[in-house]
Image: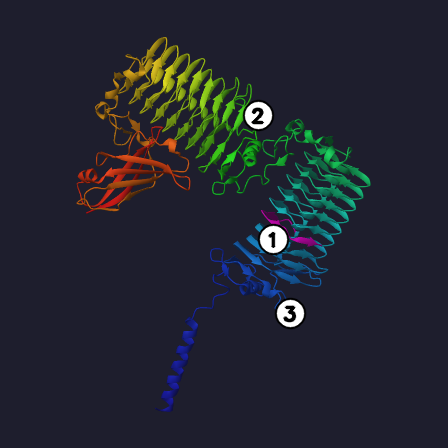
Amino acid sequence: MSGSRISSLLRKITVLIVICFCVLPAQAKYGGGTGEPNDPYLIYTAEQMNEIGLNEDDWDKCFKLMTDIDLGQFDGKEGREKYNIIGYASYPPWDPHPFTGVFDGNGHTISNFTYTSPGIRYTGLFGYVDSRGEIKDLGLIDPNVDAGTGRVVGSLVGRNEGTITDCYAQGGSVSGTGSVGGLVGYNEYATISFCYSNSSVLGNRGVGGLIGSNHGTITDCHSAGSISGNKDVGGLVGAVHGTIINCNSNGSVSGNERVGGLVGSNYHGTITSSCATGNVTGTVHVGGLVGYNSDYKISNCYSTGSVTGDDYVGGLVGDTDGTIINCYSTGSIEGDNYVGGLVGSCVYYGNVFASFWDTETSGQTTSNGGIGKTTAEMQMMSTFTDAGWDFENVWWILEGTGYPRLCWEDKYGGGSGRPNDPYLIYTAEQMNTIGACKRDWDKHFKLMADIDLSGYAGTSFNIIGYRVSSSDNKPFTGVFNGNGHTISNFTYTSTDIDYIGLFGYVDDSNAVIKDLGLIAPNVDAGIGRRVGSLLGRLQNGAITGCFAESGSVAGNWNIGGLVGFNRYGTITDSYSSCSVSGVNAIGGLSGSNVSTIINCYSTGSVSGTGRYVGGLVGVNNFRITNSYSTGPVLGNEFVGGLAGDNAGTITNCYVDGSSVAGDYDVGGLVGRNSYQDIISNCYATSSVTGVENVGGLVGYNYNGMVVTSFWDIETSGQATSDGGTGLPTAQMQMMSTFTDAGWDFENIWWILEGTDYPHLWWERMEVPMKLTPGTLNCRSKGGWVKAHFVLPADLTVEDVDSNILGRIDSLGIEADYMDVFVDEDGFVRIEMAFDRAVFCEGLTDSGSVEITVKGFLTNGQYFYGTETIKIK
């Protein structure tokens, strides 16, 4: 090959190589991403995290942490590399190089961030973040920062001018000279929210558990570490020139001058709805909440820790020339000069309004501002409401057992009260707290365990929601999810209070109480009205899957076993077996119904000395569907087995096995059916007695309509009714009686012909069942096909109706025998045996056949199980 041809070939190869390199993708930085808001740089490793500090050109970019990482390898010790802080500034002269991007911790943590220096300024994982920067959703585990004589030091950020949200420092320590904080050293005109630190903090001046010095806004934050310093030392913030809202500190604080449980010194700042519970020790200007308060305002705050100092020592504030309003303190106080139960010294323009201290726990009978009260007085709501405190939106109290607390404080078992993160209720005290904190009545709650309220007697339980008048009321408007749990022994006794129940008043179209059971509630309202075990008045909203078992409810008007008065709400899939008594509008489930009741029942006794007394409701003014009642009913006028008075529609309902007795307008189903109102597809079997207008189904029909409805003329003792058709027992237990009248036995009703009356389909309950043998040879002779049931844990042997043997309706056969027993785990088990030959006779197909077997409970419900059996 000639030299020219070789040279030409080499040139072509070179060009191809260059082209290949040009089209190769650029190497990805970090763990992926481009740094743009919708495509952030991804951080997976400690090396990638450390790399950010080396690339100043990236400090305006967006980052996202993708996993928990450990920075222990970058501690600068024993020859190891030192971590590269992100963002810095030199001074003097001022030369800022801040982080201006977004760092999304994505809920992950960075552990063992360690940094030691002899004295640099702006030390932290991020040294300096300006107003364009944002850090969120990041946790630091065991950070250890020692800046020596350096200033503006925090575990997360040294100097912050940006936004920090949902970040924390857990464990570890932070130390420096000035503006030293557990999370942030210095916060300049910026917002920090939903953050906390429990790191220990040590410094000289401007030392705080969360922030050293604050010139911005801090909301919904807390700290819990031990804090030590010289001047301007606080549990949350050392020195404040900005705003603090809804914050608290419970760490111990020690210092020399201007030392406070929450804030060391408040210079022209505002502190609202905040508290401190840690112990405070200092020399001069020492306070349980604030050491020194200059010019500005402290409102709706409290402190409970002990306070020890020499001069200017106060339970709340050591020295103030600002305003203090609606505050209190309870901690013990020791000092030498200018010592006060609430305030040590109040000078110049200082004012103290509507604020208190506990003279017993503090050991102080005097204060330079505020009003001293005994412990008993400090635990009475009236002490504070008489002074104008807001117990609707700001404060709550468990009277007689505790001091006022702020509504935002943690008081339940977890959660935030949002729909996807409800407050969690584990204890009786937490349940009682809901009623005390009215600001939470629009929140979401979830019961996490069965609880017992027997510790609350008389009127000591805090009812949730109240109504005094149309202009003076505060309803529950949130969601309470009973989560299948029960509340036992709810007791409330009064002489004349209206709207009584576990919940007093509910009014919102989105309000819900669901899946909650009350065991043995006992409510006696005297002459009070609108009373139920669960709820006094349902103005709007829904109750579903709730019940009240045993117990009793008593009052005057609109008294119900579960709900006193249902105005515009909906009650579904609920029941009561409580006994109910009163004067007018008395019902086993609800005293009055002006809305909708579906798939409900009552079994308790109901009695009223006046009008409108019914087994399910005293008065129905709208709609009751697919419901029943079985308890005895006793009243005077307008007395019915299901409803005393009907001014609406009642459809697909029944009354079975109860007695109904009264004087005037007495009916097995309804006492009086009013003008143009409708009763359809209903029946009654109860015995009925009365003086005037007495009927087996309806006592008095005032131009209403009664269609395709029946009563048993034998069991009722009544041959007549003002509406409906009377039939003997045998016909009342025949399906054709009802199907000929158009009743739906596919979706609504079922019947055991010849042995019982119709029942509603929803009364059934599916339970686990196994058939043996799993494969059946119908050519074999003799033997049994057995159905094995395991009933739910809340059912007992006595709940099973052993007088009715199991059935397989699809085969038209009944069990030959049935055994009911309790197994070693405490569950009720049932074994039903069917003759093999009879079982096989009913089969029309071979192969796999689905079999449903029924059993019956004493309350009229049936249970069933379904399994596939193979047929040879």
Of mark 3 and mark 2, the one earlier in the sequence is: 3
The label shown at residue 78 is 3
Q: Looking at the figure, which quarter contains the N terminus?
A: bottom left
**Distance CA(mark 1)–CA(mark 2):** 43 Å
Q: Do the residues labelled 3 and 2 touch (CB within 8 Å)?
A: no
The crowding category of the residue bearing disc 3, from other C-alpha atoms within 10 Å (few below 14, some 14 to 19, many at least 20), is few
**Distance CA(mark 1)–CA(mark 3):** 25 Å
The label shown at residue 459 is 2
Q: Is mark 2 on a helix, strand or loop?
A: loop
**Distance CA(mark 3)–CA(mark 2):** 68 Å
Query: Along the horizontal axis of the image, is 13 left or right of 422?
Result: left
The label shown at residue 170 is 1
Q: What residue type is labelled 3?
A: Glu
The crowding category of the residue bearing disc 2, from other C-alpha atoms within 10 Å (few below 14, some 14 to 19, many at least 20), is few
Q: What residue type is labelled 1?
A: Gln
Q: Which amino acid does label 2 sit on?
A: Thr
The question of residue 345 being in magenta is answered with no
From the image, state whether disc 1 or disc 2 is nearer to you: 2
Q: What span is in magenta?
A: 187-202
Q: Nearer the viewer, residue 662 or 567?
A: 662
